[in-house]
Image (spheres, rainbow, N blue to C red):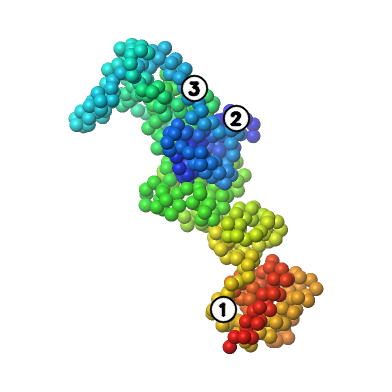
Amino acid sequence: MSDSGVVVRFAPSPTGSLHIGGARTALYNWLYARHTGGKMLLRIEDTDLERSTPENVQIILDGLRWLGIDWDAPPVHQSQRVGHYRPLIQRLLDEGKAYRCVCSKEELDAKREAAIADKRKYLYDRTCRDRNLGPDCGPHTIRIKLPLDGEIAFRDVILGPISMQVSEFDDWIIARSDLTPVYNFVVVADDHDMGVTHVIRGNDHLNNTPKQLIAYEALGFTPPEFAHMPLTHGADGKKLSKRHGAASVTDFAKLGYLPQAVRNYLVRLGWSHGDQELFTDGELIALFDIHDCNASPGIMDLQKLEWINQQKMMSLPPSSVAAEWLPYLRERGYEVEPGAWLDRLVEVCRERFKTLVEMADHVRYFFAEPESYDDKAAKKWLAAPNAELIELLATRIENIAAFTEPALEEMYAKICEERGVGLGQVAQPVRVALTGNTVSPPIFDTIVLLGREKTVTRLRKAAAFASSSG
Ligand code: GLU
């Protein structure tokens, strides 16, 4: 797609982990950029120096990468842009669109309290608006001059037409007494400098938008389009938090969800395309449009995420699942490299598990000998009368010419025939010998994946166990 001129940005405040709601905001921005052939930018809003940490920035960037989100320029750090704001504030002062205010905190607090006591909404009474105070007026803040009446109206891409009376706002402070600019001013300056055409963000920022529009107007900048996304709630209707089991991208990764599944799930939480539930990444990029998002809050439904995850585990190429699974295996101390063996392991295991964690927890026996046999399984299948059969299987497998699934199947069939028993009678003792239990992927796949040597060693050990048991 050709460059559409669309520029979006994700602007996290690095005061904590990447919340799933923030991740959805990032994803919607990214998809819209990719859908339109526009640009995706990142702005780290790290002006709260006490709560913003480089570790949190790293967690957020890692979380975005994990989700498959990339960006088209190095992230902008707001803390490094302090010098950009002063000239803009000065310009507003010079043009009479902003003014110095020397009202003290105590005076303002007293007026606020009086308003509260009268049950009135507190708005600054514009005491300093027409005083033309100069730079040497003493300690002061800088306030923006609002029109005295009229309407602030805009059409939100998701929420539709929004309008508010100017009289609901006061001449808000754009620079504090230490002359640092406030958040709502900085955002306008940054979005303008970065050429942002669409601000896609959580609707917890909806109240900031009229103020920001006033700043756009005063600065003579064309405002972007705004799209305010409903927040993500837990099933109890409250804002999603750790209390709901998982709230950050890191939490979801820890639970063993595929990024492809989380992505699919998050996009569907507020956007739909007919009744289609599962989308490839290509489909999401082709179909997603911010204009089609809906305005009701997304309710987190872990069962649905689990279902999507299982569908993705089954439908993605085994190597893609393996690439995501590898860290979970290594975390458990399993020495494993990417490649055909691991891909095959995914292929034979995946249908039985809902998450990467469940699948990693199950496959221990591919990496280490079972420490013990499940009691019930051993009583049934590794009892003394089976010792000879297990030993025979060890010898046949040791000597089989082709160590492949079909050859093993043939060999098993032969043994069943010789002994007049069903496959289960011959497969289950082997399963217990190899895995410690009676559940595993199909037995021939398990044997081939484990390899001849380990299979034979484990069978001999199990035969010895069986002959020494009562
Ligand atoms: N830093 C803000 C936040 O994390 C986002 C501001 C914006 O998108 O305009 O909620």
> Which residue is under mark 2?
4
Q: Is residue 470 left or right of residue 271?
A: right
Q: Is residue 364 left or right of residue 292?
A: right
Q: Nearer the viewer, mark 3 or mark 2?
A: 3
* Secondary structure state at the residue bearing disc 1: helix
Q: Nearer the viewer, residue 160 or 130?
A: 130
Kindly identify which numbered label has been placed on residue 83.
3
Depicted 317 relative to depicted 124: above or below:
below
> Which residue is under mark 1?
377
Name the residue located 58 percent from the left edge and 76 percent from the top edge: 373
Q: Earlier in the sequence, mark 3 or mark 2?
A: 2
Q: Are marks 3 and 2 in contact (CB under 8 Å)?
A: no
The answer to whether residue 225 is seen in the rendering is no
Identity, as a three-letter code, of the amino acid under mark 1:
Ala
* Secondary structure state at the residue bearing disc 2: loop
The answer to whether residue 455 is seen in the rendering is yes
The total number of labels drawn is 3
Identity, as a three-letter code, of the amino acid under mark 3:
Gly
Name the residue located 65 percent from the left edge and 82 percent from the top edge: 464
Structural distance between the alpha carbons of marks 3 and 2: 31 Å
Q: Are marks 2 and 1 in contact (CB under 8 Å)?
A: no
Q: Nearer the viewer, residue 197 or 453?
A: 453
Structural distance between the alpha carbons of marks 2 and 1: 64 Å
Q: Quadrant of residue 49?
A: top left
How far across and how far down the image is residue 66, in percent? Answer: 57, 46
Name the residue located 19 percent from the left edge and 31 percent from the top edge: 117
